[in-house]
Image (cartoon, grey):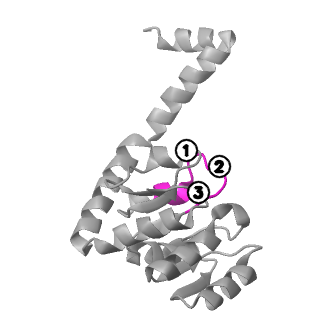
Amino acid sequence: FFGRLSSEKGVDFLIDACAAAGVPLVIVGDGPKRAELQARAAARGGACAFVGHLKGAALWAHVEAASLVALPSVWYEIAPKSILEAQARGKPALVTTIGGLPEMVEDGATGFLAAPSDLAALTGALRRAFAMDDAALERMGALARSRATTTFTRARYYREMTRLYAELSPRIAMHVAREAQPT
C-alpha cells in the first residue's frame, strides 16, 4: 500500500487480511491513523513494515519491488493516481468494488477485486494473488500497464470531458462545434 494513512483508505482491513492470509505487507505513507495502524499490525502479528512517507525514486523502488499494490478503500475513490501509477509500472492492483475502482481493475486479468469492508473477501483476494507464481503476476502486471497507458490517457480524458461539458452547456457546445469545423 502507498498513500495516506486515514480511515477511508481501508488499511486496517488490509492489515487484518494480510495477517490472515500470511502475506507480508509494506505500507508506504503517513497520516492521522499511522500510530493506530502500527499498533493494529503489532497486535495481529503479521509481517508488516511501515516505511513512512516517501517520494520520487525511493517510492517507486518500493512500488516496483512489490508483487502487487493494494487500495482497499472503504470510501468512494474516483480514479486514484496511486493505482494508475502502479499499473503504469506493471503492477497488478487489489482494490475494492467502490466508486471508480472496479473500472480500473479487471478481476483476474489486471488485478483483484474485493467488496469494501469485507475481511473475508479481501483475504480471499490476497490468497488468490499469492497463490499465483511470479510469472503469472508479471503477465497480469503487463496487461495492467498496457490498459493503463492506452485507456487512461490525456487525449481520452480531454475528449470525454469536452463531450460532457458540451452536453451540459449549450455555450460550450457552440465553441466545440466551431473548433471542430475545418479551417
Locate residue 40 relative to residue 125 in the image: left or right.
right
Region rendered in magenta: 72-85
Residue under the image location 73 percent in, 73 percent down: 31
Q: Nearer the viewer, residue 53 or 79?
A: 79
- Residue picked out by circle 2: 76
Can you tell which mark lies on residue 100? 1
Q: Is residue 166 magenta?
A: no
Residue under the image location 26 percent in, 74 percent down: 134
Query: Where on the picture, by quarter, is residue 170?
Result: top right
Q: Are marks 3 and 1 in contact (CB under 8 Å)?
A: no
Expressed as whole percent of the image width and height from the top left, the position of residue 85 reads 47, 59
Locate residue 90 relative to residue 153 in the image: left or right.
left
Q: Nearer the viewer, mark 3 or mark 1?
A: 3
Can you tell which mark lies on residue 116? 3
The N terminus is located in which quarter? bottom right
Expressed as whole percent of the image width and height from the top left, the position of residue 111 reads 38, 58
Q: Are marks 1 and 2 in contact (CB under 8 Å)?
A: yes
Mark-to-mark CA distance, 1 and 2? 7 Å
Label located before the other in sequence (2 or 3): 2
